Amino acid sequence: MPPSGCEPPSFAEETLAWSVRFAVHSFGCVESDRESAHYHLSHGCLQVQTLVATIRSGFIAPRLRDDLLLSILRAQFVFREITPDHAIGGLLRGFEGLIVLANYLAETDVQRGARHPDVVRDAQASVRIMRNCAHNEELAREIDARADARRRATVDSLLSRALQAAA
């Protein structure tokens, strides 16, 4: 039997910690894979939103919260660099929502109860808007990639025919 205060984490605590680490990983991929930054942002947002929507009791450790906040801020920095000025406002609002949700995950039930419920709802909505924008950007990127492949195939076909006709 472990000494008092040294009990191993419960399955629920381990699952919660794993879910937070997955979100941290997704936001971290924004930095390392800018080509698919919108994809990774969307998945990180979904993970945080799911955690907030499903957590009934308990909270994440301050170190996990700090890791999550740092990964969110790093992703925000990347998006400030790659997003046109006219579109950055909505993203910044979504990142602010992510910060609220990350802090919410580390609050005790008493702290959560002291907060007006609309704050979390508004944060969820802001993150959802950002997630939808990120998803739309990823879909547009996929469409563009397929269009580029079709153009290359057409040019290759025309070039091949021209070379055959010249021979």
Image (cartoon, grey):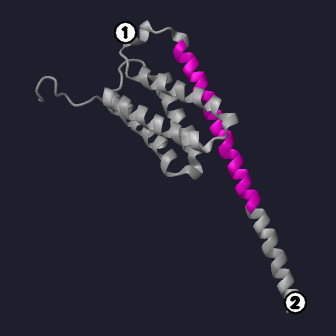
- Alpha-carbon neighbours of circle 1 within 10 Å: few (<14), some, or many (≥20)? few
Which of pointers 2 and 1 indicates the residue nearer the eye? Answer: 2
- Amino acid type at image mark 1: Val
Residue 71 location (% of width, % of height):
44, 38
Q: Residue at (89%, 87%) from the top-left corner?
A: 165
* Magenta segment: 119-148
Q: Residue at (42%, 31%) from the top-left corner?
A: 69
Identify whether 5 is placed above or below 154: above
Instruction: Give SS at disc 1.
Output: helix
Identify whether 76 is placed above or below 93: below
Find disc 1 in the rendering and name its residue: 110
Residue found at the very far front of the displayed protein = 85
Residue found at the very far right of the displayed protein = 165
Q: Nearer the viewer, residue 15 or 127?
A: 127
In the drawing, what numbered circle is on residue 33? Answer: none
Q: Nearer the viewer, residue 121 or 90?
A: 90
Instruction: Give SS at disc 2.
Output: helix
Find disc 2 in the rendering and name its residue: 166
Residue 35 location (% of width, % of height):
59, 52
Could you tell which of marks 2 and 1 lies nearer the N-terminus? 1
Q: Pointer 2 and pointer 1: residues touching (CB < 8 Å)?
A: no
Identify whether 91 is placed above or below 53: below
